Image (tube, rainbow, N blue to C red):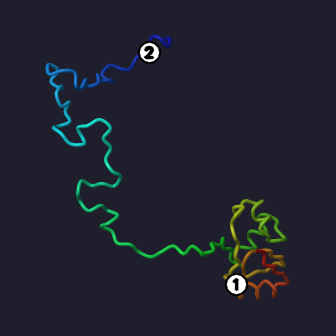
Amino acid sequence: MKLHNLKPAEGATHSQKRLGRGEASGKGGTSTKGNKGGQSRAGYASKRAHEGGQMPIQRRVPKRGFKNINRVEYKVFNLGQIDQLAEKYNITEFSLETLYINGLIGHTDNVKILGTGELKSKITFKVNAVSDKAKAAIEAAGGTVEIVK
């Protein structure tokens, strides 16, 4: 078998309809586009989201809520998770750099520590935010908390 011998399987291809090639072809005249109007003209393109006069979906569906442009998104870690992560990744300092190096956060993520669970080990924290309950638990375990902006 060579490249010049290759061809599609029998019945896999169909010849293209030859529109607008005279009346004898049966597809001449208006070339199956009907009479007059924009759709029979060359270069016709329908408007985005136009539904043929029916009320468009973006106008049928009501608006709900809003996006707060001042919202700050945090990657959240609970105290219960931190002991497991410290063991698994051999972390003594829970900082943005350490978490990024170990693939736990992205380089633009903000980190917040929440107080669910218990902290048994003494760990230093350098994060963006900490809840009051978590801060008390960290300091009770002998760790320190530093807020990084």
45 to 117, vertically: above or below:
above
Amino acid marked by disc 2: Leu
Q: Across the whole image, how many numbered discs are drawn on residues?
A: 2
Instruction: Determine whether, in the image, residue 47 is placed left or right of residue 91.
Output: left
Residue under label 2: 6
Instruction: Determine whether, in the image, residue 30 is placed left or right of residue 144.
Output: left
Amino acid marked by disc 1: Ser
At 31% from the left and 47% from the top, the residue drawn is: 46
SS under mark 1: loop
Residue under label 1: 131
Residue 5 in which image quadrant: top left
Residue 62 in which image quadrant: bottom left
SS under mark 2: loop
Residue 108 in which image quadrant: bottom right
Where is residue 130? Give x, y as percent: 72, 81
Mark 1 crowdedness (10 Å alpha carbons): few <14, some 14-19, many ≥20: few
30 to 92, vertically: above or below:
above
Instruction: Determine whether, in the image, residue 9 is placed left or right of residue 101.
Output: left
At 24% from the left and 43% from the top, the residue drawn is: 38
Q: Nearer the viewer, residue 33 or 41?
A: 41
Q: Quadrant of the C terminus?
A: bottom right
